[in-house]
Amino acid sequence: MSIGVFDSGVGGLSVHRALVQRLPQADFTYLADIALRRLQQTWLPGYRQQLGRPINILGIIVPTIEAATGLPWEHEAERRGDKVEQLDILGVFSTPGTAKSRVYEIEIDKRKQDLAVFSEPCPNLARMIEADTGAVELAQEIDGHVQALKTRIGRYPDRVVLGCTHYEIVADIFRAALPAGTPLIQQPAATADALELYLQRHPELDPGTGGSRVFLTTGEPGPQNGLVESFWGGPLRFEAA
């Protein structure tokens, strides 16, 4: 068996890179194409029945929220009538779509009532990263969003989520724009943690031992450009799916 990694494009390679670094002996197959929720709702139940054994699909939102709260996804906060006196503040930098969904605000409120979430949509940042924008311009863009979030909160957040797989590429620029020592929750590391723990809880699953790496795409196969290499960390060639 191998571990399949799905993403709509190149951003997921930053997560894939963290996964193979964490589990170097496991076999991985990466497919650049597909949607998580559709797989979970329409494909997974039938495939479980066909195999006759447990199988699951892990997304990136759940591990990121678990890392932000320090609590398992199944945990639900006990609703308290009294006012929470001391709030930690989590800043989430994300695409406008993620910010509009309020997924972090909604799901974290269910689990940890002493953690307030403030999202900052960054409408241009993923596009700038894909366009290989220079470091100075990226720093100006990121600093502008950090300062905008600080203004809305009234202070810097206590910790930060980089809520887009593209942002892994510019994590150091976010660190420079934030106060020194601000914890940075990055989706690749959070997802690698979740996968490692999931495999520990399910020893019946075999992730393989050959360390194979297969890269498939429904798009244009062949050698990839410098942008893809920056997400993966080296030269990369996709095969046709």
Image (cartoon, rainbow, N blue to C red):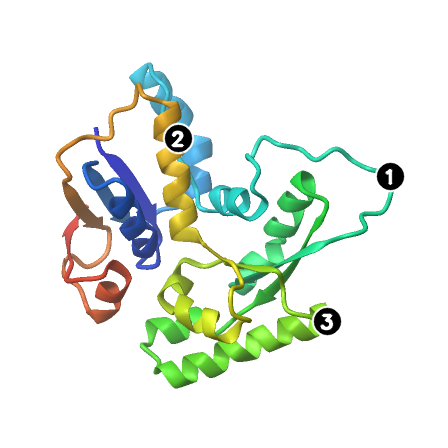
> x, y percentage for residue 2?
22, 33
Precedes in sequence: disc 2 or disc 1: 1
Circle on res. 81: 1
Q: Quadrant of residue 134?
A: bottom left
What's the amino acid at mark 3?
Answer: Gly
For residue 219, side relative to residue 77 (left or right):
left
Precedes in sequence: disc 3 or disc 1: 1
- Dots 3 and 1: beta carbons under 8 Å? no
Circle on res. 182: none
Mark 1 burial class by Cα count in 10 Å: few <14, some 14-19, many 20+: few
Camera-nearest residue between 170 and 47 = 170
Camera-nearest residue between 129 and 241 = 129
Precedes in sequence: disc 3 or disc 2: 3
Count of numbered circles on the image: 3
Up/down of 65 relative to 88, above or below? above
For residue 152, side relative to residue 40 (left or right):
right
Camera-nearest residue between 24 and 164 = 24
As helix, strand or loop, the secondary structure at mark 3 comes to loop
What's the amino acid at mark 2?
Answer: Tyr
Up/down of 24 relative to 96, above or below? above
Reading the image, the residue beneath label 2 is: 198
Reading the image, the residue beneath label 3 is: 154
Up/down of 146 relative to 201, above or below? below
As helix, strand or loop, the secondary structure at mark 2 comes to helix
